[in-house]
Amino acid sequence: MRILVIGSGGREHALVWKIAQSKLADKVFCAPGNGGIAGQAECLDIRAEDTGQLLDFARREKIDLTVVGPEAPLAAGIVDEFRRYKLGVYGPSKAAAQLEASKVFAKLLMDKYKVPTAAFGIFDNAHEAKKYIAKIGAPCVVKADGLAAGKGVVVAKTIDEAEQAVVSFMEERIFGDSGNKVIIEECLVGQEASILVITDSREVVALASSQDHKRIFDHDEGPNTGGMGAYSPAQVVTRELFKEILERIVYRTIDGLAKDGIEYCGTLYAGVMLTKEGPKTLEFNVRFGDPETQAILPRFKSDLVEVMLAASEGKLSRVRTLDWDERPCVCVVCASKGYPGDYEKGKEIFGLEEAAKLPDVVVFHAGTRRQKINDKWQVVTNGGRVLGVTGLGNTIKDAIESTYKAVDKIHFEGMHYRRDIGRKAVGSS
Ligand code: AMP
Ligand code: GLY
């Protein structure tokens, strides 16, 4: 099969790395890819948002399966376009992608089908939003309705902070139309977990649980990022909790969408808070998580292409069970100085080969680029999140140790990473 992966981050590198191992994959392309992906796939000079060119390429090159990594092309309807031309494509339709593209859509669906989530109010007017904040008090959570590159959520400790978020979303319009509506939510307390499933709307196969680390600094301090590290499995998600999350959150959501005439096909990601009253939904993503995927796929022993192909054809019942490596996996993100704010690019990265030589270690690239200087190739930084250094171990402690050993081999100017990835799980494995 000829397979095209769309995207350029660490998640896409993990997908390409796994797809390239499939016995079904003859040739893998990635648009646009990055400096690491170039080692396993032919990278194309086409942006992930350029649906027209991607479609032309897939038709011309007879691509059998296109796998869409990021949310933006899904929300723009790339899957509907590919299907119109009878091209094999893995990912949800534009209608189904609203689950991530509109938090208001997701909240209303959860309300309708009794999917547990934080109590909330929806507002299209800043004055009303502020009145509601005054009523429920702080802490509370303010969310922009639309896509905001993971930055549209403010967990406000004070009323002032919450009001400021409303002003920046609705009046200063820092995310444009994404802030036309806001959601004000009750603040939930507990540990977070990410539950990802693959579905064709009728059958659901669950991937191993994982836990992200969203804040930039150790001990969950500082601003939210796209994710500074992850580990799998998330030991807090016991077998019983996993079953409860599937039954009360995942199945109800997929069935609810189907009742409303929307088939969900692809990866569904439920971000869950494990509260004292049970698991509650924080958010849905309509794609694989980043960096969760980097921690999940090294443990995934089945053929991912077989599973995604079956889902894309509406024949997921073909897949009986998934095979997992029991060993835990840890992914530490190495980021550029300044991320999630402004940062510089173009810093040479050293030690990649030494790190990759360590046993059970894979270094996934996120924001990197290869460049040729004086006839010599070098890999340089090209984004905020630069690398996802990943390691397996017999226990979570071993996995943490082997991952950080690999991180120690790598260096670039201004490299920042968290030193506590996976620590919450130590002692429980
Ligand atoms: P989201 O993009 O909706 O997942 O939000 C980003 C992060 O904000 C989540 O991973 C949580 O850490 C936090 N968050 C979102 N909603 C809530 C909530 N209702 N209570 C507490 N924290 C929240
Ligand atoms: N790790 C969070 C996300 O993929 O949105």
Image: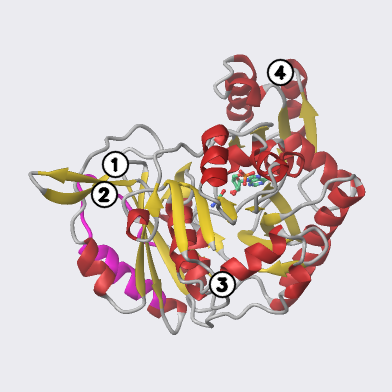
Q: Which dot marks residue 233?
A: 3
Closest to the observer: 253 or 20? Answer: 20
Q: Which residue is mark 1?
A: 337
Q: Is residue 209 visible?
A: no
The answer to which of marks 4 and 3 sits earlier in the sequence is 4
* Image quarter of residue 384: top left
Q: CA distance from mark 2 to mark 4?
A: 39 Å
Q: Which amino acid, by three-letter code, is at mark 2?
A: Met
Queried on whether the Cβ of the residue with tag 2 lies below 8 angstroms from ligand 2, the answer reads no
306 left or right, relative to 412? right
Q: Which amino acid, by three-letter code, is at mark 4?
A: Ala
SS for dot 1:
loop
Q: Position of residue 134 (x, y in %)?
A: 73, 26
SS for dot 3:
loop
Is label 2 in contact with label 1 (beta carbons under 8 Å)?
yes
Badge 1, how many Cα within 10 Å: few under 14, some, many 20+? some
Q: Position of residue 292 (x, y in %)?
A: 52, 60
SS for dot 2:
loop
Q: Which residue is mark 4?
A: 126
Q: Residue at x 73, y 43 (%)?
A: 99
Q: Position of residue 276 (x, y in %)?
A: 74, 62
Q: CA distance from mark 3 to mark 2?
A: 27 Å
The answer to which of marks 1 and 4 sits earlier in the sequence is 4
